[in-house]
Amino acid sequence: MKYRKLALFDFDGTITKEDTFIEFIKFAKGEVRFITGFGLLAPILILMKLKLYPNWRAKERVMSFFFSGTSKLEFDTLCAEFASERVPGYVRSSALQKLHFHKERGDLVIIITASFENWLAAWAKPVCDLLLGTKLEIKNNTVTGKIEGKNCYGEEKVNRLRNALDLSEFNEIHAYGDSRGDKEMLTFSTHPNFKVFK
């Protein structure tokens, strides 16, 4: 049996210099609305930082505050514009080089992130084989702000991989991450890389 190599990349903070969750809201709503909204949401965000409020629930509260009731068409348009106009500027050149290295070597390259797939999909498509991220709930062609399924963070990253792939096909798993949310993925890999991109 011929084994393949697998390369796993976290996105925010690993591939990028900025948190695209925050930057997307600024892009979509403007600085004033962003500052006002995060001021109102501050108590929840502080509790989250103190680990007294679940990360995924805080993410839902933020998305609901800013985007609940937005049409899917409008949201998709914002996501496409953000991917085209802003995401390339946040990407670390060293991370992009490593993505290309794994792709050109024939490895299966996966970007696996807690960010919502919506504003990453267009940028990720040419540089990876598969994007696994948090999914946003859409009902009646309208954004609800809620997460569909589970937040792609921590152990859920490994669960997503197990559901998407037959991992017995890979004898090497290279993983790149930068935060607590990547701990399980890094532990699971054969070649963990923590905060290697500058």
Image (cartoon, rainbow, N blue to C red):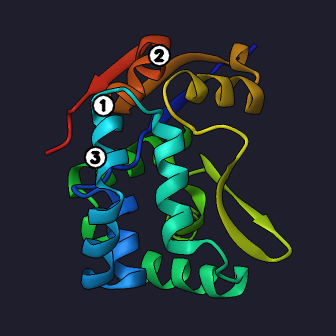
Q: Position of residue 49 (x, y in %)?
A: 28, 35
Q: Residues within 10 Å of mark 3 (few under 14, many from 20)?
A: some
Q: Is residue 49 left or right of residue 105?
A: left
Residue type at the position of mark 3: Gly
Observer able to see residue 142: yes
Q: Is residue 78 above or below residue 147?
A: below
Q: Quadrant of residue 144?
A: bottom right
Discs 3, 1 touching: Cβ within 8 Å: yes
Q: Residues within 10 Å of mark 2 (few under 14, many from 20)?
A: some
**SS for callout 1:** loop
Q: Is residue 35 left or right of residue 118?
A: left
Q: Nearer the viewer, residue 176 or 146?
A: 146
Q: Residue at x 51, y 33 (%)?
A: 153
Residue type at the position of mark 1: Ser
Q: Quadrant where the C terminus lies?
A: top left
Q: Residues within 10 Å of mark 1 (few under 14, many from 20)?
A: some
